[in-house]
Amino acid sequence: MCAVGTHILSVEDDERIRAAVKLGLEEEGWTVDEAASGEEALEIFGRSTPDVVLIDIMLPGMDGFELCRTFRRTSDVPIVMVTARNDTHDVVAGLEAGADDYLTKPFAPKELSARIRALLRRLRPVAPGHARLQFGDLELIPDEGKVLRSGSELHLTKTEFRLLCELAQNPGRVFSRESLLDKVWGDHAVLEERTVDVHVLRLRKALGTADYLVKTVRSVGYMLS
């Protein structure tokens, strides 16, 4: 069963698909709001922040990629991109826009519900262990979900934060892409190793001048220096 009160925002312009998704998710116990466009989704989001957002890529006006980027400017809400094509370009573009996961149409409501549960499980707060981790002017506070650079808080998505925590709690250790998929995403069987590369690029961008800390080890993976 889903967590009590878990609220989903489904953004889909096809009325039949939107109705089917809403019905299927509500039967699984979720609370669902609907939007037929990016503009409507932003209006709904401003009134009531959901726990997860589902975004169809092909939307009228503002497309799904731009909507995802717009959410990411102010929020770390978990986002699942939905695409009608099993196209690597769409998947990578969605992840680069800030999505945490993706799903290809057609899909069964139970599959979607299972993916949402898996997403929420892996984005739970990082287990406490280190009160603070310091790397030059970068300070990581796992227990509070915060990253500071020179005392100023940085905005990271939940996935980026978990990725940084995994690297930071084992500085100097080289992680393979497969290992990071397992530790950060968990249900990595449905994801590609390219997912890790995209999120590392996003993490480096979020770290700004501290991006040098995340090192690429050629043909192996990544480490925090």
Image: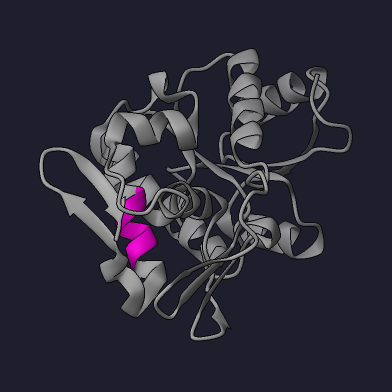
Q: Residue furthest right?
A: 4
* Residue 65 on image: x %, y %: 42, 53
Image point 33% across, 42% down: which residue?
Answer: 196
Where residue 5 sits, quadrant-wise, is: top right
* Residue 104 on image: x %, y %: 42, 25
Vertical arrangement, residue 58 with respect to residue 214, above or below:
above
Magenta segment's dominant SS is helix
Vertical arrangement, residue 84 with respect to residue 199, above or below:
above
Vertical arrangement, residue 59 with respect to residue 2, above or below:
below
Q: Is residue 208 left or right of residue 68?
A: left
The quadrant the C terminus occupies is bottom left
In magenta stretch: residue 57: no
Residues 130 and 193: in front is 130
* Residue 33 on image: x %, y %: 76, 42
Task: Report if residue 15 is visible in the image.
Answer: no
Task: Report if residue 20 is visible in the image.
Answer: yes
Residues 14 and 100: in front is 100
The quadrant the N terminus occupies is top right
Q: Is residue 1 left or right of residue 132?
A: right
Image point 57% across, 52% down: which residue?
Answer: 158
Q: Is residue 123 left or right of residue 188?
A: right
Image point 60% across, 46% down: which residue?
Answer: 78
Q: Residue furthest left?
A: 218
Image point 43% across, 43% down: which residue?
Answer: 58
Provide the residue span drawn in magenta: 199-204
* Residue 128 on image: x %, y %: 67, 48
